[in-house]
Image (cartoon, rainbow, N blue to C red):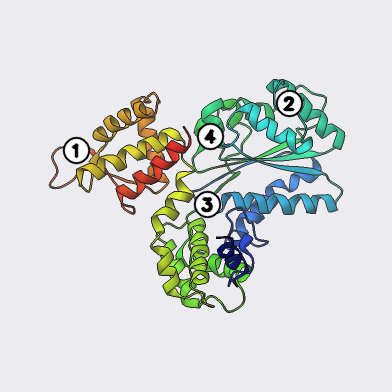
């Protein structure tokens, strides 16, 4: 058995830099996001004179929100340091740190990895952060990624405190600037007192990538990740064509990676369209793997209810009323209390925005007027099986 592992490790690969195919990898250049980088540079240029700014970046999954923020912040703090201005950059994923204390702990761990994970109130942690910045004579550029998870669980009190950090202190200006990132319009979730610190013009709305933009992104990753002349132009074009249905760069990059693995598996020295087609056969697990993990538990339960209902009925559509009943039963199965109708409807809109379902009004040949739900791109059996694994793993 160990010989099999050793042989596989020792075998040659057309992939030269696997890291460049990772979701967290941020290339030096971001194709088709140059204008947004310039916009951020213009906005945050005022930090060089200690004038804080706050920006909101929104857009669907796979549109480069996180990569844009990471590339800008990394480049900006280097440029600022050359001018003698010290700016610290911290990136917090609010889906992993969805409470005020956890988010603040993530910030303080950047400055002091040994800072205790309990025993301090939020206000005490804010005071520690203030002292850390004063000690360094530095500003903080703080990115709150997937900030909607924090706002849903803890409200906007932390963001309020951060945007008013200098109000009651003997500081000339607020040393903290924010970048909020979300798929959703989180302005609707902010209190008016917080909203006043965000200029309506300081918004970057990213659209889904076009087919040609995805082609450029895949081409770049090929050059970064593969040995020279090991990926055919036809394969790049095919990946762009497939991924253009969703406009999702994450999906395109994962499809490229999986096609590369198929080529290696067959000991081929070039990635051809046949390898892409083999990877496309796994399209449903790929889509769900990258997108399902972005959903919270009740969004997953709602989607699971849709998949189970469609799987049992053999119909193309199911009504929202039928799904809501199945959702309530599913919640009980997983020890969760069903949310009210308004929240349930929000969950439906969230998973529709994520690209899993279509919702339409009943039309010709259907009795009455009601909302109908369909799964346009994935079999109900495949989806329900994948969600069930995620839900069971989190028990």
Q: Which quadrant would the N terminus be assigned to in this image?
A: bottom right
Instruction: Judge left or right: residue 135 versus residue 385.
Output: right
- Residue at 41% of width from left, 45% of height from top? 353
Residue at the disc numbered 1: 369
Q: Secondary structure at mark 4?
A: helix
Comparing labels 3 and 2, the label whose residue is closer to the camera:
2
Comparing labels 3 and 4, the label whose residue is closer to the camera:
4
Relative depth, front residue between 184 and 102: 102
Relative depth, front residue between 328 and 270: 270
Residue at the disc numbered 4: 149
Q: Residues within 10 Å of mark 4 (few under 14, many from 20)?
A: many
How far apart are labels 2 and 1 at the CA level?
Answer: 53 Å
Which of pointers 3 and 4 lies earlier in the amino acid sequence?
A: 4
Which of pointers 4 and 1 lies earlier in the amino acid sequence?
A: 4
Instruction: Judge left or right: residue 178 versus residue 288.
Output: right
Residue at the disc numbered 2: 126
Q: Are marks 3 and 4 in contact (CB under 8 Å)?
A: no
How far apart are labels 2 and 4 at the CA level?
Answer: 20 Å
Q: How many marks?
A: 4
For the question of whether residue 74 can be seen, the reply is yes
x and y percentages locating residue 111 in the rendered image? 78, 36
| Tag of residue 206 | 3
């Amino acid at each position: 058995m160990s010989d099999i592992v050793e042989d596989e490790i020792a075998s040659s690969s057309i992939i030269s830099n696997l890291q460049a195919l990772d979701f967290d990898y941020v290339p030096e250049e971001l194709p088709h996001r140059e204008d947004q980088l310039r916009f951020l540079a213009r906005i945050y240029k005022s930090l060089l004179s200690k004038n804080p700014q706050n920006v909101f970046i929104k857009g669907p999954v796979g549109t480069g929100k996180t990569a844009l923020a990471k590339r800008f912040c990394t480049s900006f703090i280097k440029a600022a340091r050359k001018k003698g201005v010290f700016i610290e950059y911290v990136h917090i994923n609010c889906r992993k740190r969805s409470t005020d204390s956890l988010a603040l702990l993530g910030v303080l761990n950047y400055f002091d990895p040994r800072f205790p994970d309990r025993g301090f109130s939020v206000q005490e942690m804010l005071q520690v952060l203030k002292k850390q910045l004063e000690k360094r004579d530095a500003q903080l550029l703080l990115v709150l990624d997937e900030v909607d998870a924090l706002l849903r669980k803890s409200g906007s009190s932390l963001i309020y405190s951060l945007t008013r950090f200098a109000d009651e202190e003997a500081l000339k200006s607020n040393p903290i600037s924010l970048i909020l990132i979300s798929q959703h319009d989180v302005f609707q979730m902010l209190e008016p007192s917080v909203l006043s610190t965000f200029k309506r013009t300081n918004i970057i709305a990213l659209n889904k990538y076009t087919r040609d933009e995805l082609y450029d992104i895949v081409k770049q990753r090929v050059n970064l990740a593969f040995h020279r002349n090991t990926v055919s132009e036809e394969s790049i074009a095919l990946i762009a064509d497939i991924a253009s249905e969703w406009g999702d760069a994450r999906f395109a990059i994962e499809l490229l990676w999986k096609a590369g693995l198929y080529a290696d598996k067959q000991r081929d020295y070039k990635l051809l369209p046949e390898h892409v087609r083999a990877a496309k056969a796994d399209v449903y697990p790929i889509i769900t793997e990258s997108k399902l993990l972005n959903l919270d538990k009740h969004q997953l339960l709602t989607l699971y209810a849709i998949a189970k209902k469609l799987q049992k009925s053999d119909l193309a559509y199911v009504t929202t009323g039928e799904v809501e009943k199945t959702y309530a039963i599913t919640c009980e199965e997983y020890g969760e209390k069903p949310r009210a109708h308004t929240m349930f409807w929000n969950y439906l809109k969230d998973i529709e925005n994520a690209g899993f379902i279509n919702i339409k009004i009943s039309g010709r040949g259907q009795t009455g007027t009601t909302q109908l739900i369909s799964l346009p791109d994935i079999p109900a059996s495949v989806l329900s099986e994948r969600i069930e694994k995620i839900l069971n793993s989190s028990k």
